[in-house]
Image (cartoon, helix red, strand yellow):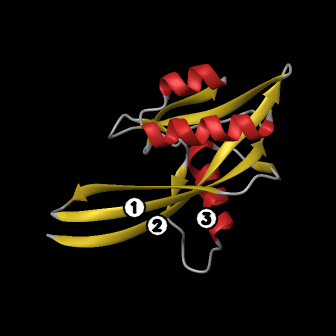
Amino acid sequence: MRTVNDTSYGIVPMMKKEGVWRVFLIQHRHALHWALPKGHPEKGETDMQAAERELEEEAGLKVLEWLPIDSISETYQFHHRGNRVNKTVTYFPALVNEEFWLDQEEIQDGGWFTLDAAIERASFPQAREIIKEVFKRVS
């Protein structure tokens, strides 16, 4: 079995409505897990440009303002096509527009969630920790 290193970039999409912070989560069509939007960079893109493009491609959301919060990374391993993949994803917290649409080929569902609802909905422990940390920093 070969080990492959993989890197992606995403956004922790935030908005404040009626005084309450909310985060946007997506449900991937094939794996059905709930997570933050992310994806691989294209040639010539910076990390933040890749994150911004993926957010718009998957959910139609646009960054209005980068939050003054350091990026947060997660690392995990999984197996794919006989390889062990060491994955690192770096997320950039940002205020985004409220209205969204979903890429029907990749995304099953998506929506805005309060902290408690997001923690309940997010499929993986590391995603829940990232969400908690961003809510803590903006509150």
If you read the primary sequence from the N terminus, does the residue marked by circle 2 or circle 3 appear first?
2
Where is 27 relative to 80, above or below? above
Choose between 9 and 136: the one closer to the eye.
Answer: 136
Residue 66: assigned label: none
Q: Residues within 10 Å of mark 2 (few under 14, many from 20)?
A: some
Of badges 3 and 1, nearer the viewer stands 1
Q: Residues within 10 Å of mark 3 (few under 14, many from 20)?
A: many
Q: Residues within 10 Å of mark 1 (few under 14, many from 20)?
A: some
Where is 92 relative to 139, above or below? below
Report helix, strand or loop for mark 2: strand
Q: Position of residue 8 (x, y in %)?
A: 50, 62
Q: Residue at x 60, y 28 (%)?
A: 111
Q: For the residue marked with disc 2, what is the amino acid? A: Thr
Choose between 50 and 5: the one closer to the eye.
Answer: 5
Q: For the residue marked with disc 3, what is the amino acid? A: Ala
Q: Are marks 3 and 1 in contact (CB under 8 Å)?
A: no
Q: Position of residue 41 (x, y in %)?
A: 54, 69
Q: Position of residue 21 (x, y in %)?
A: 76, 28
Q: For the residue marked with disc 1, what is the amino acid? A: Lys
Q: Mark 3 highlights which residue?
A: 50
Q: Are marks 2 and 1 in contact (CB under 8 Å)?
A: yes
Q: Residue at x 58, y 43 (%)?
A: 130
Choose between 131 and 38: the one closer to the eye.
Answer: 131
Q: Position of residue 60 (x, y in %)?
A: 65, 44
Q: Mark 1 highlights which residue?
A: 87
Where is 120 relative to 67, above or below? above
Alpha carbons under labels 2 and 1: distance apart: 6 Å
Alpha carbons under labels 2 and 3: distance apart: 11 Å
Q: Mark 2 highlights which residue?
A: 7
Q: Residue at x 43, y 44 (%)?
A: 105
